Image (spheres, rainbow, N blue to C red):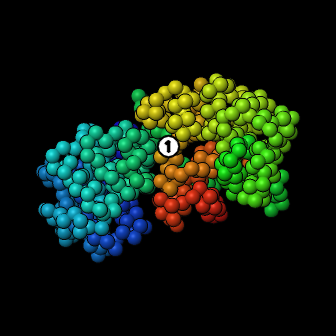
Amino acid sequence: MQMKQCDTAQMDAGTPSCTLMERAAQAITKEIYRLGWEKKQILVVCGQGNNGGDGLIAARILHLDRTHVDVYFVGDIERCTLETKQAYADAMESGVSFIKEPEWESYGVIVDALFGIGLSRKPEGAFAQVIREINRSGAAVLSVDIPSGVDADTGEAPGAAVQADVTVSMAAYKRGHVLGDGVNHSGKVICADIGIGTDLFDTAEGEQCPPYVIEERELSLIPKRNRDSNKGTFGRVLVIGGSRGMCGAAYLCAKAAYRSGAGLVEIFTCEENRQPLQILLPEAIVTAYTGDVPEPSLLQSALERARVVVIGPGLGRDSGARMLVRETFRKVQVPLICDADALNVCAGESLAYPGDVPVIVTPHPGEFSRMTGQSIETIAGDPQGSAACYARENGVICVLKFARTVITDGNTLFVNMSGSPALSKGGSGDLLCGVIAGMLCSGLSPVGAASIGVYVHGRAGEAAESVYGEYSPLASEVCDKIADVLKNIR
């Protein structure tokens, strides 16, 4: 709804609709070229609205560049907008090939320009059948603005909806990209600047302001390192975790903290984990306790040395773990990141978070359900609202882990668009805690560290996927890709 208002306002300000459509078409073709898809046989599926006009202009551009492209127009040309009628006529005059019955399997790429953000009900009849054919084709799919069949405001797909590999969103991300069915249908979302102002996002009465979306440019906020820096400059991360037989979680968290900028990392764990951790990560300092319950003075000393504390990875829920969580909450004097078992202990014992230090909690939906008493279905229906409410009520920064992870302090809301199914592995959450801790040590604010840390973690997952595919990357391999994400920061 807001995007339509911004679009109208831009035209009222003097930018013709046909100019905006031309820019949108250029953004579409730019992404096709970036992906190397112009080498494949392309079908552009166009509807009657301006979204279809965008597709028609893109087809004309591709055709004039001698790319093999066909257009399949769905609907009645007499019911088109004036701009789309003109785009149709221009494409015909340029010699673009229009076909009546596509052989769907013969195309390597399909551009979905069927509905866009104007959809107000589920597709029916011929339109629904076309969407099903697109999904069955086996082609790579690029959707214009939002996959056809997905509601741009809610992300709901009440009927047939295009399953896109890439979505080129004009001017701004839509709520439908980060909510509900839209998350899985949108694929990788590219936001294209076509000259539409988005000031109305902050002022439209009755509309919920969209969240900030974390993008590549935010990496430039990570402070540059001075030449005279040393390990003490970037502080010590204390990782409290690793019960007997569970040292892997603490190892992954600690290694990710090092990869993300921490000067020193200390692991506080049981004696049985000392030797394997020293072998796995010789750079780390290991402080180990004997027996089931650590000496409070040993923990106190470790807390006093730390600039950032992470508690939870592989911690367990036994009496020793419960004592560590209670004592850490009582004595910590620096930013605290709570994950995994620390959250479960906190929920089980109804502990209050420390009130005088920044606290970042990083639950997945199951943990968040235990923390709030809400069902996972309720949380999934409104992850942004659920996370914001929890953050406000508890005075914390909440990182609610979904395919589109939400980061919020209860006032400002961020949504992460990076990531990969490759991150659906044990150990990914431990890495995330370490990355956020490293970002804190690098000098970012708690909200900045949480949001940029989530983005870096997602980009590392994408980098691992590019090497190993979606199925095979290990968490340790994702960790090593953090370096690739951070090495070219400007």
User: Horizontal and vertical percent for residue 197?
Assistant: 44, 46
Can the viewer see residue 386?
Answer: yes
Q: Position of residue 93 (x, y in %)?
A: 18, 68
Give the residue drawn at x 40%, y 70%: 36
Total numbered badges shown on the rendered structure: 1
Mark 1 packing: few (<14 Cα in 10 Å), some, or many (20+)? some
The quarter of the picture where residue 152 lies is top left
**Whole-percent x, y for residue 348 in the image:** 62, 27
Q: Write down the quadrant of residue 73 in the picture.
A: bottom left
* Residue in the picture at 54% in, 57% down: 461
Q: Is residue 436 visible?
A: no
Instruction: Give, as a three-letter code, the residue at label 1.
Output: Phe
Give the residue at the far bottom of this rendering: 66
Q: Nearer the viewer, residue 228 or 355?
A: 355
Residue drawn at the location 18% of the way across and 63% of the way down: 102
The reply, left or right, for residue 55 in relation to residue 419 is left
Quadrant that contains the N terminus: top left
Nearer to me, 90 or 33: 33
Q: Residue at x 38, y 57 (%)?
A: 165
Judge whether 396 appears above or below 274 on screen. above
Front in this rendered view, residue 111 or 297: 297
Tell whether 152 sits left or right of 379.
left
Q: What SS does tag 1 mark?
A: loop
Quadrant in the picture for residue 320: top right
Quadrant in which the C terminus is drawn: bottom right
Residue 104, placed above or below residue 453: below
Q: Is residue 106 left or right of residue 154?
A: left
Q: Which residue is mark 1?
A: 402
Residue 355 in percent (x, y) is at 71, 27
Q: Which of 155/285 is in front?
A: 285
